[in-house]
């Protein structure tokens, strides 16, 4: 499974730990940066990862900023992206099972490394349940068509 990943400066240390964790567990990773602690803007990294996922060049994306909020808002502006900000493992499996989330967003300043890695594992192992949830995703797509020009 191929995972694209990106962060701003506030998410850089956690990004590096997640990249190592994914490689240790046999995932292919595509790291879009940032690679230095210099201050940068989370929308730039959200866009790179979101476009990679949207274009089918990776199975899932992982985005990290200080809170996970800005980077998830930015990713969700891209047509077809369903980015879920998670701070617990219940949300990590529910966002796959119910929302078919294709990007996981994390806040490095909010959760510890152990919880973050558990969330990553849970997200990647969980499957979309379809059924009644598909009807709701179809409604999300209709909102995109109405407002995304
Ligand atoms: C950067 O200081 C911080 O604002 C950013 O990482 C993020 O938390 C925004 O939502």
Image (tube, rainbow, N blue to C red):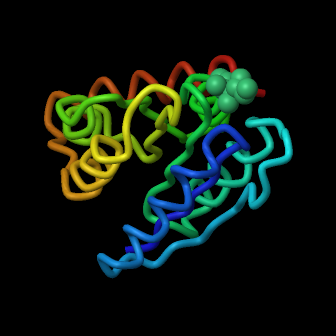
Q: Would you place residue 88 above or below residue 127 in this image?
A: above
Q: Residue shown at 29%/76% (left/top)?
A: 25
x, y (%) of residue 15?
Answer: 55, 54
Determine which quarter of the picture holds residue 39: top right
Say whether residue 4 is visible: yes
**Viewport quadrant of the C terminus:** top right
Seen in the image, is 40 located left or right of residue 8? right
**Viewport quadrant of the N terminus:** bottom left
Determine which quarter of the picture holds residue 59: bottom left
Seen in the image, is 14 located left or right of residue 26? right
Q: Would you place residue 76 above or below residue 51 in this image?
A: above
Q: Residue shown at 49%/30% (left/top)?
A: 141
Q: Residue shown at 29%/47% (left/top)?
A: 114
Q: Quadrant of ligand 1?
A: top right
x, y (%) of residue 111?
Answer: 39, 32
x, y (%) of residue 5?
Answer: 57, 58
- Residue 117 vs residue 126, the one in the foreground: 117
Say whether residue 148 is visible: no
Q: Would you place residue 3 above or below residue 86 in this image?
A: below
Q: Would you place residue 70 above or below residue 118 in this image?
A: above
């Amino acid at each position: 499974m191929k995972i694209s990943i990106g962060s701003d400066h506030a998410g850089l240390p956690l990004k590096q730990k997640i990249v190592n964790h994914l490689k240790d567990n046999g995932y292919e990773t595509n790291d879009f940066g940032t690679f230095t602690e210099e201050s940068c803007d989370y929308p730039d990294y959200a866009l790179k990862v979101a476009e990679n996922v949207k274009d089918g060049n990776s199975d899932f994306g992982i985005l990290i900023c200080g809170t996970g909020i800005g980077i998830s808002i930015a990713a969700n502006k891209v047509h077809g992206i369903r980015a879920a900000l998670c701070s617990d493992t219940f949300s990590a499996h529910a966002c796959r099972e119910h929302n078919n989330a294709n990007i996981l967003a994390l806040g490095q300043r909010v959760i510890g490394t152990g919880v973050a890695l558990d969330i990553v594992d849970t997200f990647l192992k969980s499957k979309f349940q379809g059924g009644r949830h598909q009807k709701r995703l179809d409604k999300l797509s209709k909102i995109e068509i109405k407002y995304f020009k």
